[in-house]
Image (cartoon, rainbow, N blue to C red):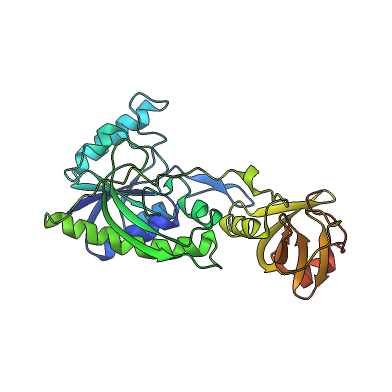
Amino acid sequence: MKIIFAGTPEFARLALQHLLEAGFSVPLVLTQPDRPAGRGMKLQASPVKQCALEHGIAVAQPRSLRLDGKYPEDAAAVRAILLQANADVMVVAAYGLILPQWVLDLPRYGCLNIHASLLPRWRGAAPIHRAIEAGDTSTGVTIMQMDAGLDTGDMLLTRSLPIAATDTTASLHDRLAALGGPMVVEALQLATQGALQPVAQPVQGVTYAHKIEKAESTIDWSLSAATIGQRIRAFDPFPGASTTFAGDTIKLFDYKIDSYNRTPDKGCGHILSINTDGITVACGDGTALCLTLLQRAGGKRLAAADFVRGFNLQPGCVLGT
């Protein structure tokens, strides 16, 4: 079976690696254009592009696949390449571009997507982040037959796994990526045997995982400690949950739910105590959060005891100011 692979980040690279290790022929990879990154803002190839080049696979990086869009020349050039590749199927994983109908119709087996949620929950761009943010206790991977809708196609395979109370987007991402690679290999093997059994998505339970915006990173201390904790984990590593004090931005990366019994005069965001365990902050609903891992702008992540040595925080200070 000849496969065209479309993907960009590390999640997709692991899937491509599994396909190659399983012996599938991948003559062409589509990935996002190189982007500036790092302190020097130098152009960097995506993890998928790096993997493709290591294996001698041709790479195309169109800015769009719409023949009637902003970059029709890119779409026309890729169309010619795809026709020449004459692939049986396209596998898509976190690619970042919408596939128009002409792409969906091109391969014999259509386009299969590796989606990091149990559809129809968390359709869209950020399913891992949103599952943690919402306090979900489980998630999984769906191999889906793509159609023109936003993650609305028939389900081909699903696997679930629990979300641990300590999971961040980074750790859950790695476990889902490790799950998704073997699943797409299994789906393609079943496709060659004519044994795939598409199942329509339920009409109930649809939720959308909208793209994460940097503006969401600012912590609202009037929320409960549990809700704030979920956001800290959901926004690790990007964009990083944050608060402010005296004009400085502080990023928050680990915590404990605190049983501190605060008095009514201590409003949300007040620092209640600082000790070797961490920095305890008053939250909504009478709850408190003990911050244990923090970072100043441009600095390293530090345990709370080390962080306060270089930052003038005291009980009674108010975060978010």
* Residue 316 position in % (x across, y down): 88, 60
90 or 289, nearer to the observer: 289
Q: Dividing the image into 4 quarters, which one contains the N terminus?
A: bottom left
Using the image, determine if residue 75 lies above or below residue 42.
Answer: above
Residue at position x 17%, y 58% in the image:
190
Q: Is residue 225 visible?
A: yes
The residue lying furthest to the left in this view is: 193
* Residue 241 position in % (x across, y down): 65, 54
Question: Seen in the image, is 306 located left or right of residue 218?
Answer: right
Residue 148 sits in quarter: top left
Question: Seen in the image, is 40 located left or right of residue 72?
Answer: right
Question: Seen in the image, is 106 located left or right of residue 173?
Answer: left
Residue at position x 72%, y 66% in the image:
290
Residue 19 sits in quarter: bottom left
* Residue 16 position in % (x across, y down): 33, 57
305 or 103, nearer to the observer: 305
Using the image, determine if residue 146 lies above or below residue 116.
Answer: above
Residue at position x 57%, y 49% in the image:
37
The residue lying furthest to the bottom in this view is: 276
How many numbered marks have been drawn onto this rendered protein structure?
0
Residue at position x 36%, y 32% in the image:
74
